[in-house]
Amino acid sequence: MASTSSPAKVKTQNRFVAIKSQTLSDPEKQSLLALAFAVLQERHQPGVALPSPNETCDYLRMLLADRKAEVFGCLFLDNRHRVIETAELFHGTINGASVYPRVVVQQALTLNAAAVMFFHNHPSGVAEPSHADEAMTKRLKEALALVDIRVLDHIVVTVGETVSFAETGLL
């Protein structure tokens, strides 16, 4: 007669839940940050669909939070919103970066992207988009629309927060 016992349920434990940042040494904090960034990076590799808006914002915050000058980049995506490439396209100064629509369109066409998400940081720590940010996004969206590439979002990143143009109705 065959046994009908059910397999034992495996309990998943979270080894990190009890860890408090104030109890970690500086090297431990660096290791933890590196691990967190590696996990987020795995979820934004080429061929992987974007996991969630929150995880993408977390990934971009970890990517750009410690930058002392503005960086503008794009997540280039296919039709199913899978990552083709994450690219930092322009580097600027502490309060701005020159962004050229021609370069963005060229890169999107080279990668055969169907959609893009823009991102840039504000080293000042204030994530509120400026009028220049809004005008640049509008120009980029118009340029990409000419070649049937959708703009899904533009995310402004600081150490403490992110602001999504899509979520705030700016896109």
Image (tube, grey):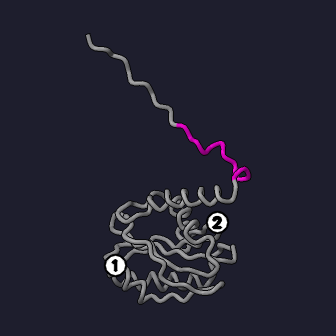
Could you classify mark 2 by the number of other residues whose Cα lies within 10 Å: few (under 14), some (14-19), or many (20 or more)?
some
Residue wearing tag 1 = 148
73 left or right, relative to 27: left
Outermost residue, left side: 1
Q: Nearer the viewer, residue 109 or 166?
A: 109
Q: Quadrant of the N terminus?
A: top left
Count of number-bearing discs: 2
Residue 168: x and y in percent read 58, 68
**Rendered image quadrant of residue 130:** bottom right
Residue 168, compared with residue 3, is above or below; it is: below
Over which residues does the magenta segment extend? 13-24
Q: Real-space Cα distance between discs 1 and 2?
A: 31 Å
> Sequence order check: which comes first, mark 1 or mark 2?
1
Q: Secondary structure at mark 1?
A: loop
Amino acid carrying label 2: it is Glu
What residue would you read off at disc 2? 161
C-beta proximity under 8 Å, tags 1 and 2? no
Q: Residues within 10 Å of mark 1 (few under 14, many from 20)?
A: few
The furthest residue to the right: 22
Note whether 50 is above or below 157 in the view shown: above
- The kind of secondary structure element at disc 2 is loop
Q: Which residue corresponds to the image point at 55% horizontal and 66% vertical from the top-left?
A: 167
Query: Which of the 4 image quadrants contains residue 170?
Result: bottom right
Residue 26 disc label: none
Residue 14 forms part of the magenta stretch: yes
